[in-house]
Image: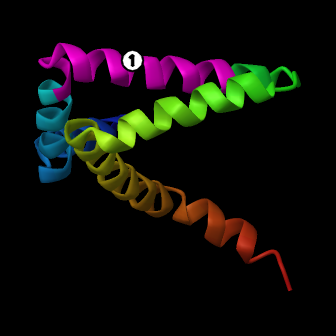
Amino acid sequence: MSNMYDSAYDLEKAIRESEEFKGLQAAFDAVMSDPTAKKTFEDFRDTQMELQQKQMQGQDITEEEVEKARKVVELVQQHEGISSLMEQEQRLNMVINELSQIITKPLEELYGSQQG
């Protein structure tokens, strides 16, 4: 079993050394070093988390909250640095999703063979 964990740590290291992660890290550092961009990004993230929490708790989201979120998203989309950060994040997420599919393939094959 330790071999699986060793492989997982090797994969973590490979992710950290990947171009996708390095691109994300550079974009993140650029946003965090710009006070205006940092504040806009943090507002966006806070708004996103508030709405997600309300949804998970089954609470209704008010029209006022929807409008606030829309304004924050507009600001984020207009900021080149934040847009770049989100693009880089999306690229790394795609890689991680592909890796997850590879890792879970034995389970899919096992359970998939039971169908039909």
- Point out the image quarter for the N terminus: top left
Disc 1 secondary structure class:
helix
Please tell me how crowded label 1 is: few (under 14), some (14-19), or many (20+) other residues with Cα within 10 Å. few
Instruction: Report the residue marked by disc 1.
Output: 42
> Of residues 42 and 71, which is closer to you in this image?
71
Of residues 100 and 50, the one drawn nearer to the viewer in this rendering: 50
In the image, residue 23 lies at what x, y percent?
14, 45
The answer to whether residue 36 is magenta is: yes
When asked about the image quadrant of residue 32, the answer is top left
Task: Decide which of 48, 96 is in the foreground and name it.
Answer: 48
Residue at 41%, 62% in the rendered image? 98
Q: Which of the 4 image quarters holds residue 5?
A: top left
Q: Quadrant of the C terminus?
A: bottom right
The x, y position of residue 18, in whole percent, is: 14, 49
Q: Which residues are magenta?
A: 31-51
- What type of secondary structure mainly makes up the magenta span? helix
Q: Is residue 4 above or below residue 67?
A: below
**Residue 64: in sight, yes or no?**
yes
Q: Amino acid at mark 1?
A: Glu
> Magenta span has 98?
no
Residue drawn 44% across and 63% down?
102
Residue 33 horizontal side relative to residue 57, left or right = left
User: Would residue 111 be found to the left or right of residue 21 on screen?
Assistant: right
Query: Can you tell which quarter of the image residue 74 is in?
Result: top left
Residue that extends furthest to the bottom in the rendered view of this protein: 116
Name the residue nearer the viewer: 9 or 45. 45
Percent from the top left, x then y, of residue 2? 36, 34
> Residue 25 at x, y = what percent?
16, 33
